[in-house]
Amino acid sequence: MKTGWFLLLVAVLAVTPGRAQSATPEEAISLERQGKLAEAAEVWRAVTQRDPSDAGAFASLGVDLSKQEKYPEAAKAYRKALALNPKLPGVQLNLGLAEFKRGRFQPAAVAFRAALAEDPSSTQAHALLGLSYYGAKEFALAAENLAPIAKDQPENLELHQTLAQSCLWAKNYSCALEEFKRIAEQNPDSAAARVLVGEALDGQGRTNEAIAQFEAAAKISPREPNLHFGLGYLYWKSQQYAKAKSEFESELAIDPGHAQSLAYLGDIEWKNDHPDQAISLLKQAMKSDATVRIVQVDLGAIYMQQKNYKEAQQALERAVALDPAQPDAHYQLGRLYQAQGNATAAEKELHKVRELREKADESLVGKMSASPPALNPSNQK
């Protein structure tokens, strides 16, 4: 207890007017060399109180706070330093890193762009800018910035993984495939690497080659989460429904609540003209995850066939709300309006189908996962 009161007293004294007058940069630097970062930060704070126009003191305060992982306070100190002296070297980079470390990727990117404007040769700023874009889900910009860094660091597997994911989610499949193949060559027994190669191949429309990669991955790691769903989806996409059904059932043996496997099993039952079984599976899928769009499309089509137009319309409108860019729900809505004698509404939906059909994307990317692997900002320096 005495120790706690003593430290509190020291903290209070550190910011009193008398302390502010006596504090010096030399004292703060000496404390830093001793590893006493909290004490050094208090001295810098006192220096800034004595001279609120000392940009360097604010910048140094930010450094000591960052080293203590007090990133919000550090960012505030860096911004104050930049407000006083926008040209202060290194502060934009430090500000970007403080924002990045606390997962604020958009402001981090702004700071790293400013750091690159100061020093275009900074590999660190370039890499961190690319990672910030990745964290902000601006994948095309992430790939653009990470590609030259990765080229110069062939041994940095983590960097190549992030570049590969950026390319994949930016739908730059040739870049993704090149990177994933490099990763797979270094990890020939990695099921995850083969899955990623398969995703990139499918994105290029090379679905049969993608299936081969998934089949090899399933042999390496038969209980890899999501793997059997991915293989099943590729079979489903190739209209190999019996094989697809087997894979979806394998995924459900690992994860009984796997919503997408339930949904696509329901779709296969619907295609096989078993509407009751289809509805049961689709409703199970919806209980697990209400955002699986094919559930609503199929329920809408089944209800429409059963002339249950009210529920059909509700399901199809939910499907459109989940992804307005996919043409199938608009097509089913058009058919529904035709069945109800509403020619104007039907033509409007079918016109959308004609507009969207060229743009529809049914690749495996986005089916296996809602987003790419998240960054771990604490790993970055």
Image (cartoon, helix red, strand yellow):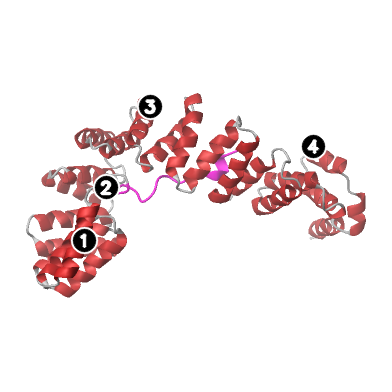
Residue bearing mark 3: 182
The numbered mark, 4 or 1, whose residue comes first in the sequence reads: 4
Q: State left or right for residue 347 relative to residue 84.
A: left
Q: Nearer the viewer, mark 2 or mark 4?
A: 2
Query: Closer to the camera, 5 or 334?
Result: 334
Q: Is residue 320 magenta?
A: no
Q: Nearer the viewer, mark 1 or mark 3?
A: 1
**Residue drawn at 16 percent across, 56 percent down:** 267
Residue bearing mark 1: 330
| Separation of residues labelled 1 and 3 (CA atoms) | 41 Å
Say which mark, if any, is on residue 361.
Answer: 2
| Separation of residues labelled 3 and 2 (CA atoms) | 26 Å
Q: Which residues are magenta?
A: 366-381
| Separation of residues labelled 2 and 4 (CA atoms) | 57 Å
Q: Residues within 10 Å of mark 3 (few under 14, many from 20)?
A: some
Q: State left or right for residue 353 relative to residue 221.
A: left
Numbered disc 3: secondary structure: helix
Residue bearing mark 4: 33
Q: State left or right for residue 99 relative to residue 258.
A: right
Q: Quadrant of the C terminus?
A: top right
Give amino acid for label 2.
Asp
Q: Nearer the viewer, mark 4 or mark 1?
A: 1
The numbered mark, 3 or 4, whose residue comes first in the sequence reads: 4
Numbered disc 1: secondary structure: helix
